[in-house]
Amino acid sequence: MNNIMDLTLDDLRLAFRKAKIDAYYENGDNSVRKFIDYELQLDKNLNSLLLNILLDQADNDIEKSVGSFTYMIKSIKRDKESLTNFYYSNADEDWNNLENEQIEIQYRVIGQLEVEMHVIASLWIMKTGHKLERHLSENSYGCRLRRTNQKECFFKPGSTEYSEFDKGNFRPYFVDYKSWQNKGIDTLKHEIRNGKDVIAITLDIERFYHRVNPDFINSKEFLDLIGEADLYNDPYTILLLKRLEIWTKKVIDEGIFDFDMLRIRHCGIPIGYSASKIIANLLLFEFDKLIEKHIDPPYYGRYVDDIFLIINNTGEITNSEDFWNFIQKRIGTDKIEKVIDEDNYKLSIYYSKQSEVIFSPKKQRFFVLAGKSGEAFIESVQDSINENSSEWRMLPDTDKDLEALTKEMASPTTDSSEHVNSIRKSDGLSIQRLKFALHLRNFEAIVHSLNAHYWKDGLTKFLDLSLDFVVTPLNIDVYQKYYARLVRLAILSSRIDYAIKIINKINNSFDLLQSRSDNDVQFELCRKHINETLTEAIITGLNPDLLAGKKYEQYEPLFKMLNQSSNEIVKYHRYAIYSDWHVVPYKRFLIDDIEFRKSGLKHDKFVLDSAVLSNNSKLSHQFNSLLEFWYTYIKRTNAGFPSALFYYTRPFDTLELTLLFSDWLTNESKFDLLLLLNRIFGNPEIEGYIKKPRQHKELANYLYVDIKAEYKTIDRYFCLSNFYTSEDSWIADVRDDHQEPDTGRLQRLYRLINNVLRVKEKEIDYIVFPELSLPRSEISYVAKKLKNKGISLIAGVGYQKKELRNELQPLKGSVSNQLIYILNIGSSDKEQQISIIQEKVFPAIHEESNLMQVGGKILIPHSDKKYIINHDGLYLSGLICNDVLNINNRYPLRGEIDCLVLVEWNPDTETYDGLIKATANDLHCFVIQVNDRLYGDTRIRAPYKEHYMRDVVRIKGGEIDYFVVSKIEVESLREFQRDFRSSPKGKFKPVPTGYEISDERRHYKHKQ
């Protein structure tokens, strides 16, 4: 039993941090201004909450901190006959022809909760909820809590590894949804291939959240059932239930009459509320057990209220009623009963009699599958799922993507045009919505990071398309949750004209729909809700550069349209940045050269008191590490310690930390701090997967780095890019033109990478790009896309620049020419990425002169360190172009590596040809040379005995960018090298005189 008197202010601080993250990712709660206001006086507010909890606050005081409710449009139902007879491509014309058609608008109650209500939910999860949630079945996939050592695709019932320090409460949606779906598909394939006839069934619970009475979480019957009797009358559960009861009473007393509420005497639980997600899952605890025990199906998976069930086909089920009779026979008619005078079936829950779980016949689907036809059907479903999934993994290609989207959005969405693309029902509208959401996300990503010339024309087409097809009266129910993001996208891209058009169209659409509405009160609440949502979009979307003193006058028409004062918007815009609610994450302001930082980053009131958190606090260890991070490595202004580093919404991930601490491998204090920060920011731990670098036995500038991952073998597949970077791009970069002359460069890059991501024949392990080919702005974005397919990136990246102030030498600055390794690390289910940066020590002759002549710059490396990297059994090293000419860079690698990666921008391919051949023989390793497409000779050279095998691949020229994929046979090479004398019968040339394989490579045993 928890003792509430043990509650501390630190507990509430952690609960607030989790609540803030959960609220950030929740759609529709209108929390931005509430959280900002609360955080402005955070310690005062949390101290007050602590006191109120400990003194058992009165109900009338609690009511103020609970919040309210509003409505969203759930559905707009049209006359079905008109849908099947006519199709209008123009949405306005479609509306104008509705004169005699009946329209029914249905509404959904949603919470508009106060911050303290969210904090109480997180506090309950931290103290009690996680103890209940751990008993859920491993077949329950949706809205599951983060647990320290829980794998992505697997839940451990009874796991106690919940961390109150973790970021947010819940696991990522897409991972568990994909597991739920894919495990079912895999089971179907397995059963059918083994000669089984099966039926796949999908079920949906009707109005699930609105019919859940949360009181059962404090019932003896339920707590006894799950083995947590000690939690009866738990003080944190009572704290939560009291507030949910007040919220329910408010909805019933002040809301619009609802027959369901009258009948069951409650309104359920707030949608989107973090505690609601756990309570809803717990309500179905017994149902999960009944299905698993009495049905014992080949597969059962539940994603909150969506159920995917596979049973063997015995011939007794030919319709829905047969199925429910089948279920009743096995789990009992006292558990599942038919609703009188309806086709619905109802679950009887003995520990929550006031909750209702009704299975809706409208969303039931049955698939009777057998033999080759069943296998073909499942393959088509799998292909469709993979296609949709792969689209989300791709980099945006605005021209091609918009053509496809336009056709998709303009196509009819009636039943006649539907096609099955998943086991669940996906009609034309849901497919269109999925495609639209994908393109919206892509534009959000590229507007953040790329110059306007890349996306300007495509964005205009996309916004026009949205005005035609998305912002219409009859599509409000389908797309309303994207309206705020559309407005924010227009604002962030400085398309104020389109932001005004979109808001005008939204208002006009609501006006037209209101003329058909029977309930003005609900409709007005819907409009008020969307108005606040759009206001939040402006607050979180205004360009951060405005804080550098630029004027807001051009935005005044927007503010007036939403009845908002300019001063209010400007104030909350500033606060949104400092509290990490802005669409641009706060961490970006610490890394990137964002204009307003030049005038001094003033955090206003969003500064934490170091003394409070660094002394006598269970948070002190975390906070002191953050203080060191801020004051030693980040701070460039007079600002104090920013609260957004502790109360974050989007913390640094592992890759970002290693990019920020570029010398983390050569600086021991940074190495240790990085590991600490990685834990503080809630990322999977990497301590067990990387060791501190070791010095080379002979040369001070070579370090050994050991990185663990989960590769099946030490043989690896390399993708060699044949990519072109123009001389004009180099000049523009060196001169600091801030304008890319090759307007197609990024599009070419994205298309090449997308083609790599589409490769199905082989699992690519690494992709290599030439010297200076990858723009620095794209490093993280591209690497994270590649990570989704398990691909590590090795690339030459654009110059890193630094100003020089030297009165004796009229220089504009220095540059660093870098090779970056972004390598996958950790177990496959919690794979992270780390970056290792290696610098070119001496410029090429033409590079040195051109840098000075064109840009007034010189090449100065920050470090001469090079690396021998053991990447889960593959020992590799890398050099940049003319660094390979220095024999001192090559000879220490003999016997130490399996492959050497060379990135080049080199016209002298003839000289390098002999060098590459000699290096492959002398080092007796694979040499992977990747040069600019203009010059070619990109290849993999190997020390094979047979001449025709030595160039494993070799490419040159071409008018378009492309790539080749090839395997390097590391296992057979290493086995050959283990012999005291090289066998003349082996496939490789004898090792050179004096060659000795390193002990590590000789004795390495790969763990699969």
Image (cartoon, helix red, strand yellow):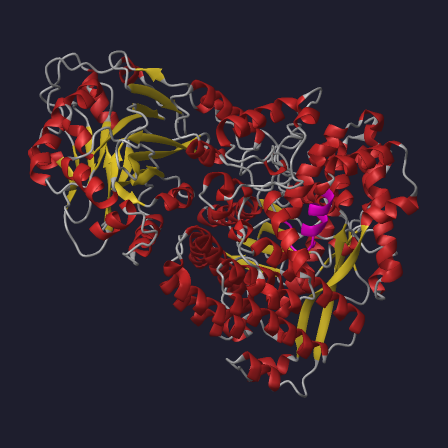
Q: In the depicted view, which residue is nearer to us: 972 or 604?
A: 604
Whether residue 314 can be seen here:
no
As displayed, is residue 519 above or below residue 833? Answer: below
Residue 818 in percent (x, y) is at 29, 35
Q: Residue at x 65, y 73 (%)?
A: 507
The quadrant where residue 13 appears:
top right
The quadrant where residue 841 appears:
top left
Q: In the depicted view, which residue is nearer to us: 695 or 144?
A: 695
As displayed, is residue 76 above or below residue 292? Answer: below
Whether residue 623 can be seen here:
yes
Query: Is residue 977 shown left or right of residue 415?
Result: left
Query: Is residue 65 shown left or right of residue 93?
Result: right
Residue 472 in percent (x, y) is at 59, 74
Seen as rendered, the residue at the extreme front is 807
Query: Is residue 798 shown left or right of residue 275?
Result: left
Residue 700 in percent (x, y) is at 28, 15
Query: Is residue 820 shown left or right of residue 464?
Result: left
Residue 745 in percent (x, y) is at 29, 54
**In the picture, which quadrant includes the C terminus?**
top left
**In the picture, which quadrant includes the N terminus?**
top right
As displayed, is residue 326 above or below residue 472? Answer: above
Q: Residue at x 73, y 58 (%)?
A: 207
Asked if the magenta segment contains residue 704, the reply would be no
The number of numbered discs placed on residues in the rendered structure image is: 0
Q: In the depicted view, which residue is nearer to us: 371 or 181?
A: 181
- Look at the image and give the residue range highlighted in magenta: 25-38
Q: In the depicted view, which residue is nearer to us: 81 or 558?
A: 558
As displayed, is residue 94 above or below residue 318? Answer: below
